[in-house]
Amino acid sequence: MKREDYLSKRAALVEEAQAALDNDELDVFDSKTKEVEDLDAKFAESEKRRANLDALNRAPEVPGAANLMNGGRVDLTGATDADPENVFESAEYKKALMNYVMKGAPMPEKFRNADAGTVSSEAAAVIPQTTVQKIIDKIEAEGGILNEITRTAYKGGEAIPMADAKPVAYWTAEGATSGDGIDTQQVTLGTSITFSYYKLRVAVRLSLEVSVMAWPVFEAHVVKVISVAIRKALEAAVVSGNGSGKPKGILAETVVSGQNVNITEGNNITYADLVNADALLPTGYAAGARWYMTRYTFYNQVVALKDTTGQPIARVDHGLDGKPVARILGREVTFVENGLSNFAASVSADTIVAFLFKPDDYWMNTNYELALKKYTDEKTDDECMKSIMLVDGKVIDKNSLVTVTVKNG
């Protein structure tokens, strides 16, 4: 659905809903309101899929490795956008990249960024797109919360409209106004969110010691070490990032009043605590919400709990892929190992140890054009490589967030 068609159709429906409300045609008003909500949901799903498709189909723009922030490009010594071969996928470039990382050989002049604005200390080489895709596949294969959130690829700084018009119907006597004196409602066509450019640096130490190897062996090592580092950093940001120089995480949001369960310090999590947390989920957000906690918390605090009839409330089943699937009262549990604390009976400050959340209400905007730089750790003399990417993320609707907090004191 095109944005113009969506906005045009939405405006017409809102106008019809307003007219129905003015004429006390409440059945028509309810019908039009439902049409607006269905249209919003359809458009949001369409935008989500379009963004994901753009991310999959986006051809590398051959950016300057260290100039990703301002769209710099690399001087390919005669190569142009019309060239049929992506130079970063060529055997020559891959060999040069491998020699740069393993032997410290400088990148050939034709592969260097020619933009005068480049900060050379940031990055010196671009990781080939096929290798980047393998890194992404590796991250997704390991599952977790990163597989569940909404992934987008919007241009940084672009305002993205978020439909939020949900008119309220009031019971009135015939010919009278609404009980609180409101005749009509101001309908907001939508707010917007804007993604920033946050630069994520992941540094990994080089453990390969052979001086001669084939590209597939080198690539496999790069994919392994970078994917693990990126996954850990992104997961921690999604869960608890503070929004300063990094994405704002789920737990950085202020919980809606009343949607928190407190555990008194010194006590364990009880059956009643988990039931209460689930009960606090607004009905409209219950479908799709999941539990998030560490494996330690689940297996040490939850898995042995039983209901009033003696039945266990937590179960671990095996999915179609043979992997265990944890559930609490039928609701799936996703284990989080970065950005969330294990349960502890004694804490130095109020600590969130578990939470409920609808993951598609968190959007992560990512630029997967990864750059690479080799450097020496001056403290240890270890050879390291640093990969750089652009990412931002934020909660677009926090109403499904319910937290379980161990209180200090």
Image (tube, helix red, strand yellow):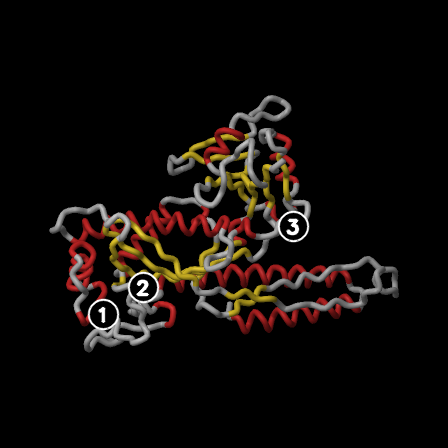
Mark whose residue sits in front, 3 or 1: 1
On the image, the x and y values in percent for residue 128 come to 26, 61
Which residue: 66% across, 59% down? Answer: 34
Q: Which mark is residue 122?
A: 2
Mark 3–mark 1 Cα distance, whole angstroms, equals 50 Å
Q: Is residue 262 left or right of residue 87?
A: right
Left/right placement of residue 146 relative to residue 344 reads: left
Check disc 3 and report the residue beneath it: 256
Q: Quadrant of residue 349?
A: top right
Front one among 158 and 348: 348
The local crowd at label 3, few if under 14, some if 14 to 19, many if 20 or more residues have their Cα within 10 Å, is few
Which residue sits at x=29%, y=75%? 115
Whether residue 178 is situated above or below residue 261 in the rendered picture: below
Mark 3 or mark 2: whose residue is earlier in sequence: 2
Q: Residues within 10 Å of mark 2 (few under 14, many from 20)?
A: some
Residue drawn at x 56%, y 69% is 6
Q: Quadrant of the C terminus?
A: top right
**Three-letter amino acid code at the position of disc 2:** Glu
Q: Where residue 112 is drawn, which disc sits there? A: 1
